[in-house]
Amino acid sequence: MTDIVFHGGPVFTGTGDPLHGQAVVIRDGRIVAIVPEAEIATVAGADVERVDLHGALLSPGFQDAHIHAVGGGVELLQCNLSEAGSADEAVALVRAYAQAHPDEEWILGGGWSMDHFPGGAPVRTLLDEAAPGRPVLLQSRDHHSTWASSVAIQRAGVDASTADPADGRIERESDGYPAGTFHEGAGDLFDGIRPKTDAELAYRGLLRAQDELIPLGITGWQDAMVGHGTAGLADPLPAYERALAEGTLQVHVTGAQWWVRSGGIEQVEHMVAERERIAGLQPAGRLDVGTTKIMVDGVAENQTAAMLTPYRDGHGHDTHNHGLSFIDPAKLREYVTALDAAGMQVHMHALGDRAVREGLDALEAARATNGVTDGRHHLAHLQVIAEEDVPRFAELDAVANLQALWATHEDQLDELTIPFLQEGLVERQYPFGDLVRAGARLAAGSDWPVSSAAPLDAIHIAVNRAYPGSAQGPLGGAHQCLDLATALAAYTSGTAWVNHRDHDTGSIREGYLADLVVISPDPFGLPASELHTAQVEQTWIGGHRVHDRSTTASAPAAPDMSRES
Ligand SMILES: [Zn+2]
C-alpha cells in the first residue's frame, strides 16, 4: 500500500497556530505520523506518493454544522437561476429550461436575485412568456420569496380576494390580483399544489450536493432537517440511506431529526428508535441521526424571531410584536430534558435574544434534572444574544453554531432588520467575539442553500465582519471579529465535536482519518482583507484525493468508496 506524504507547507491541526516544517504521513486512509520533514524516511514506507504543498496550507477537512444538502442539490438539478446576472438572463434561463424539459409539467427551482427586479419583485407575465401555459414556482436566492407564473397562481386558487397571511405578503397589481411575487409565508399558499420531491430526485440531489460541496473542502456535515414532517420537502433520510447502501456517500453525515411542533413528547421514543436503526447500517460511522432539530423561533426579516424587546414600526415606534416562540418555553424545557435524558443531541434554531434565552433555559433545566451529559447540544444562527446570556454557553456546555457569512452589513440586514429592532441591538448582532471571550465552544455552518456553502467565504466574514471590498466597518465593532485560527477551528475541530466525530475527524492527529483540504495561498500569510482570495486546491477523504482544482475542469475525480471507518 502506498503511503502518502504531505510536505512543503504549513499544517493547521484543528486549533491554534499552524505547524511549520512538518510532514503528514497517510497510510490506509489514516494519518499515521506528523514528523519533521527531515525524518520522513524514518516513518514512511518504501512506496511513497509525495504531495508537495508548495507553501499551501494543509488543514482538516471542513465540516458544516448546519446545512440542507439534499434540498440544495435538488435546486441545482432544477431550474437554477443562481448564475443569472440580470432579469433578462434569469428569464432566458427559465425559457431554456422549459424548452429543454418539455415533459416536466412543473418548472421548479430558484436562485433569482431580488436586486435584478424593480422593487425586488419579478412579475408573473415574465414567466408566462418564458414558459407558456406551465406552472412555475421559483425561490429567490435567499429563500424568502417565491416567483410564480399565472398558471401556478390559478391552480393555488389565489386571486385578488386572497388576503395576505399573517407571516407574509403578496405583491399585487393595481386591481389587487397577485403580480407574481410572494414574500415569506405567502409562498406557503402553493404548498397544497407544489409537487413533492420524489425519492429518486432527492437521491440525485444528494449526489449533486456532494459534487458541489466536496470541491469547497467539505468532508462532513450536519443536515439540519431529516425525518418526517418537513413541510413540502421529501425526507432526505432515505436518500442518505440509499447512498450509504450503494457506496456513494463520500462524506460523513449527522442528520438532525425534525421536531414536529404540533406534536409532543411522544416523538422522543420514535427518534431514539430511528437513531438505533440507522446506527445498525453498514458501513458504520458514515451516517448518524442522533440529533433532534427544534425551531425555537422564526427569522428577524419578517419579525418572527423571538425578541426580549418589541420590534419597532417603520417610524421607529414600538409595536406590540416580540416575535414568535414556536414552542411554549415550559414545553421546550420538558422536551429538551427528555431528549437529553434519551441521549439525543438537541440542535436548536434560535435567532432572537428571547429564543436564545429560552433555549439556554431548556438546557439548564435538562442539566438540573439529568446532570452533565455528553449531549453536545447546540444553538444555531444566534443573531441577537443578550449580554447576560453570553456566559451561559460555557456554563451549560452549549455550542454556538455560527453562520458567519451573515455577520456583515448588507442590504437585507441593514434595510429589513436593523431599523425594526430596538436602538443598540446592532451591537448585539452575531456577537462572536463575546462568545469566544466567555469561553464558548464554537461550530460553524452555512445553512446552504439559504446562503453560500463555501467555508472560506464564511471565514473571511468571521474574521472581517464585512464582505470583501465593503466600505462599511466590522458589524458590531472590531471586538466581535474572530481570529483566523479560531474561525478555522470552528469549521473543523469545532463542528467535529458537535457531530460527535472529534475522535477521528476535524483534526490532523495520529490515528485520525485523512479527511484533508489543501488551501492556497496559505490564509495565515494573507492580510485579513484578502482572506477571500484563498481557495481550496484539493480535498481528500479517507486518504483519497476526491477533488483537485488543477484537474477537475476536464476530469472529475472518481474516488474509491471503500473507506472503512
Ligand atoms: Zn437551516
Image (cartoon, rainbow, N blue to C red):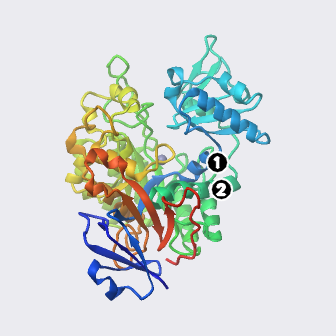
Counting residues from the N terminus, which is met first, the one under dot 2 or under dot 1? 1
**Circle 1 sits on which residue?**
77
Q: Residue at x 45, y 63 (%)?
A: 538
Q: Position of residue 301 (x, y in %)?
A: 43, 32
Q: Position of residue 552 (x, y in %)?
A: 54, 59
85 relative to 512, above or below:
above
Quarter holding residue 396: bottom left
Q: Secondary structure at mark 2?
A: helix
**With 224 as the anchor, is 468 left or right in this view?**
left
**Circle 2 sits on which residue?**
204
Quarter holding residue 383: top left
**What is the spatial separation of the Cα atoms under label 2 and label 1, in whole angstroms?**
8 Å
2 and 1 marks in contact (CB < 8 Å): yes
Residue 338 visible? The answer is: no
Quarter holding residue 57: bottom left
Residue 191 visible? The answer is: yes
328 relative to 9, above or below:
above
Asked if the beta carbon under badge 2 is closer than 8 A to the nearest atom of ligand 1, the reply is no
Amino acid marked by disc 1: Leu
Amino acid marked by disc 2: Arg
**With 526 as the anchor, is 348 left or right in this view?**
right
Q: Position of residue 220 (x, y in %)?
A: 47, 62
52 relative to 146, above or below:
below
Dot 2 alpha-carbon crowd within 10 angstroms: few under 14, some 14 to 19, many 20 or more:
some
